[in-house]
Image: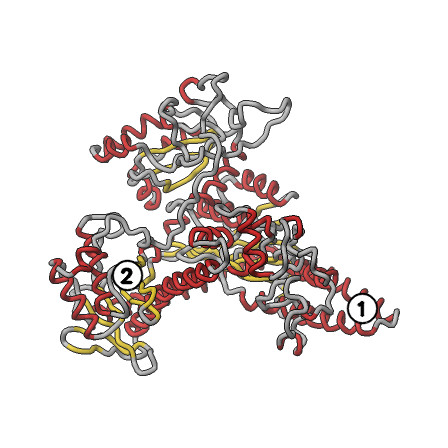
Amino acid sequence: MADWEKSARPKTQPEEKPDAPAVAAPTEGKLPGERDAAQGAAPGGEVPAGGAAPAQREPGRESAPAVAAPAEGKLPGERDAAQGAAPGGEVPAGGAAPARASRGRAAAGAQEDGAQRLARLRRKARALPLLPGVYFMKNAEGKIIYVGKAKALRNRVSSYFVGVESHTPKVASMVAQVDDFDTIITANELEALVLECSQIKQYMPHYNILLKDDKSYPYIKVTVGEPYPRVTLTRRREEDGSLYFGPYSGSVRDVVSTIQKTFLLPSCSRVFPRDIGKGRPCLNAAIKTCMAPCSGKVTQEQYLEAVGEAVAFLEGKQGDLVKELSQRMEQAAEQLRFEEAARLRDRLQALQKLEQSQKVVDAPSVQRDVICLRFDDKNAAVVVLTIRNGRLTLADSFLFDRAQLEPPEAGMSAFVKQHYLQRTDIPREILLSVLPDEADLLEQYLTGRAGRRVHLRVPQRGEARRVLELAERNAEQSLARLSDREEKVRRGVAELGALTGLAQPPRRIEAVDISNTSGSEVVGGIVVFVDGRPSKKDYKRYKIKTVEGQDDYESMREVVWRRMRRFQKGEAGFDTLPDLLLLDGGKGQLSAVREILDELEIDIPVFGMVKDDRHRTRGLVGEQGEITPRPVSPAFVLLAQIQEEVHRYAIAYHRALRGKKTFSSQLSNIPGIGKARAAALLSELKTLDAIRAATPQELAGVPGMNRTAAQAVWRYFHGEELQNMEDVDQTGKSKYNKE
């Protein structure tokens, strides 16, 4: 046995992680249901009716229950031994749902058959109160797989475990995995709805409708908390004080670019005010698509004015904006401020051109969203038309499996809740193709979020009905395009199976690639395609542990050996073999991996993916020679997609490790900053630019740092004498700077 085979038998592999986001660690605080000793324990672990609020309330005031944060180092729902378990697994109002079931419950579940499990869950459900609240369905591993709300917890939760044969396919699939559940009692149904939405956002359960299908939808972000705000595209919405518009399912990169050019906002990576006066303005300033704040000739007031106009446009206030710009332009001309008038004229013309590109679909004063739900045999499409001032500003489509949105009333309700949980621009009127369940409750919820009355209705005639029909046509087209894509993918999988000599089309395909730079930071990546589609939750990445230097063959052997050994051990996430294993490489990689599979006595088809002289996909190589699909065939398209995806995944991991190493090395050059402090700075502030822009006070607040180390880092980037922390103000500007 080779040395690498002996040393590559890890008990755990921290770097081998799927792409799925991890649940954030709990914050410091009390456990759900904890009570002060003076209060005593709640009998039966149950909160009195209406007891969603904390035990102490202000007289005459009823507040919505806030989810309590668990104690540091504990999972939500865990209790100290002295406390004992909450009877019935019930979580008191204001408590968070447990993140996992007790080991005893999981062990008991493993010994039960399906009927015994359902009987146990029915007994527990019958013990619940007839009160509003939120319930959390969990599988045998304690993972939350569904979050729902109820007007009466006992009735709603019990319904899952009786008449199982009459459930929809989605509900039946979920119930088959439920091993336990927990509840939170709320004061009323509206509070339950609000809490349900927030918990879905936090836990992202598999069986809830999520506006994600292996990708995150983009937002337009305006960083209004900065001295010089930027308009950018982002796929993460954070609580950072910025304004977010979206999410959008289509590409909004062109929209962001157009807004930047229209309002002359920068698209570069410069940071203001830090970079004002440093270096020459770029080409965008010369072609008049940026006001060039870097030149120092633009005041902060002028810049903020342009940002405000961009925000007004995103909010659908084009008409008011055009009117205001026209008045300001005329006033500037009358006062002989011709340069300012010309600047306003150019901005007005750009805005009018942008406005004209938007289709007029309604009365000029109308502000509404239109949501249409349509089904075909397998899929569902939801189209959202955003209409502001009578103009169609955005047409967005979301695609789901049909089972996720059936029946349509429940599907529409779930979609509306999730859609507007993430949006900031809720209009006064929302037109729908089908009235959702609990429409009145949803109106209350949306009214509370918008801060004004919001109406939901299904139009039957007139202009509103015509706009809804436009959404219906868009939804039908989305389903047709999806059906066409699915047929091409199906044909691609079938053709690939035939080319490789498989008896059946390969349902699960795994591909492996190695990435390195001159033998440093060698990594491997495995991507997984299921039914011809990327399954990103199953992706794995490996840091090569035993191979010295650049040796693709041996590195490929190590990656495949580690993956297959974990299959043989039956580890979760590794317990399914691929129907087809593809390697990025030729005969050398194929021979190396074939030896490993033979040694492990694993028989799966293996092929190498070869490229042409231009480093583009050419075909496959097997033990019988090379296989070259037709360049335009569905099989070739699928193969090229797989090869590109595994290369992207492996090189992204390699670049991340290389960047961390370079970053850490640079910081380690600073006196007093070792590897531990460099790693802490990287973990906390993420980028070198963020560390450079941080004040000494902010640097000192990073775990592991102190005042002396913070001063050293600040001096390293700014090169000024810093006597003490007070020599730099809260903006990071040195008091010694004369500018």
Q: CA distance from mark 1 to mark 2?
A: 64 Å
Nearest the viewer among 460 and 79 is: 79
- Quadrant of residue 722 in the image? bottom right
- For the question of whether residue 389 can be seen, the reply is no
Mark 2: which amino acid?
A: Ile
- Quadrant of residue 78 in the image? top left
- Residue that carries the numbered disc 1 in the rendered image: 329
* Side of 256 relative to 617 (left or right): right
Mark 1 or mark 2, which has the lower sequence index? 1
- For the question of whether residue 60 can be seen, the reply is yes
Callout 1 environment at 10 Å: few (<14), some (14 to 19), or many (20+)? many
The residue located at (13%, 61%) in the rendering is 603
Mark 1, secondary structure of its residue: helix
- The C terminus: image quadrant: bottom right
The residue located at (28%, 61%) in the rendering is 544
Nearest the viewer among 42 and 683 is: 683
Callout 2 environment at 10 Å: few (<14), some (14 to 19), or many (20+)? some
* Side of 707 relative to 72 (left or right): right
Say which of marks 1 and 2 sits in front: 2
Mark 2, secondary structure of its residue: loop
What kind of colouring is applied to the model shown?
Answer: secondary structure
Coordinates of residue 428 in the picture (x, y in percent): 64, 48
Mark 1: which amino acid?
A: Met
How many marks can you see? 2
- Residue that carries the numbered disc 2 in the rendered image: 544
Nearest the viewer among 373 and 296 is: 296
Coordinates of residue 584 in the picture (x, y in percent): 27, 70
* Side of 353 relative to 49 (left or right): right
- The N terminus: image quadrant: bottom left
